[in-house]
Amino acid sequence: MPFDAALERGLGGLPDADRRLCHELAAGVLRSGEALDAILAPLLRRGLDHTDPSVLEILRLGAYQIRELDRIPPHAAVATAVALTRERIGERQTGFVNAVLRRVSRAPVSPPPGLDLATRTSHPEWLVARWLERFGPDQTEALLAWNNSHPPLVVQPTSGDVDALAARFEAAGVRSFPAPYGAGLVLEETHPERLPGYDTGAFYVQDPAQALVVRFAAVPPGATVIDACAAPGGKTIGLARTAGLVIATDLARRRLTRLRENLARTGRQNVAVIHADALQPPVAVADVVLLDAPCLGTGTFARHPDARLRVRPEALERLVAQQAALLDALADRVRPGGVLCYATCSLEEEENTLQVDRFLARHPAFRRAAIEGLDVPRNAVGDLTVLPQRDGMDGAYAARLVRDETGG
């Protein structure tokens, strides 16, 4: 279960202030797990591997509060951890938890000397090595810092432009400012349902990078669009602003339920939601096909703190093969002269530029055809390329490919 869904299930009945704190603690421990373990390890007489896992989780929570949350005094963090130990594990472990966390509170604030970059920032070592080779040390450190930050709430207008939505917020006393590249509004509020216009569907929550993918796709007015792998529907809503009809498909029924809820709230009537495998598209042909492909998700570590725990080198190889199969299946669904837009939320070249290069070699009827003049970050060949450390938002990639008028 995704982090946000699991947290919502567990915290649904708590007051807002308590929910916010629990979210901060859970996300913070996920973001900082390896660094916290490096702090705790010298203090555990039996080592990390031989400490009761439940006790270790409480120690991580306490250590995170002590090291990262200035608003919680260390003595309060220790007392809370001891009380939680007593409630969940029993009296016998309370003295141990108390002693370890008191030592944490007296330790220097800086990380232990000699920690490698991956451990210090709690990222997979193999991934940090890749990024160091590609981006160099300065950009990699900036990327890792972004991944361990707290991205703000960003919303997109369902209709109209961001200026009109900003004016509506301002009239209600809600502060907002433009996201990079004008791709949405950044808000200080963290609960979208409290904002004016939420109930009437005036806006939807979406990271600026995903809004840039929709902008880059440049759907012509009135076009028929296949949105493959569409759930939870943020891009679907954006595509529907100009499309005549969007056929939104996804293989996961649970995610389609959320997509339908988002469409109902925003009042989109020109979207047909179909439970279908993108490898077997239910529509013969469309003007535009958007494939938001399953990917490693390395551009979303800040927004999804649990994602870094799931990435493996072998998963990258499997996903690259899956993406290629999806591209091949959807290519025939693009009408002659139509557009295939391939997108990921990954930073990895194998899933992005190299994947598209291989597709074009297999399908000579397609060519890159990005729209000139769009205000989006691009790479050397013109593909949309959003880098968190440079652009201040989630990472994303998209290539806009046009099929020859002859159909190839």
Image (spheres, rainbow, N blue to C red):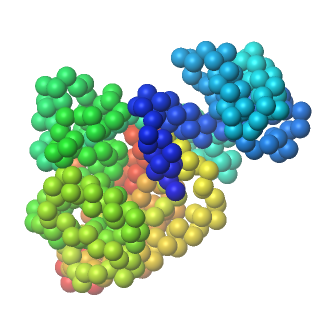
Front-lying residue, 331 or 59: 59
Q: Residue at x 64, y 60 (%)?
A: 313
Q: Residue at x 14, y 41 (%)?
A: 161
Residue 373 x/y as whole percent: 20, 48
Seen in the picture, residue 394 relative to 253 is either above or below; the reply is above
* Extreme residue in the right direction: 45
Seen in the picture, residue 50 relative to 341 is either above or below; the reply is above
For this view, does 216 lie left or right of residue 324? left
Residue 267 x/y as whole percent: 15, 55
Residue 400 x/y as whole percent: 30, 63
Q: Residue at x 30, y 38 (%)?
A: 192
Front-lying residue, 55 or 228: 55
Q: How many marks?
A: 0
Q: Residue at x 34, y 35 (%)?
A: 191
Front-lying residue, 267 or 302: 267
Q: Give the position of the C terminus as an image quadrant.
A: bottom left
For this view, does 128 lie left or right of residue 297? right
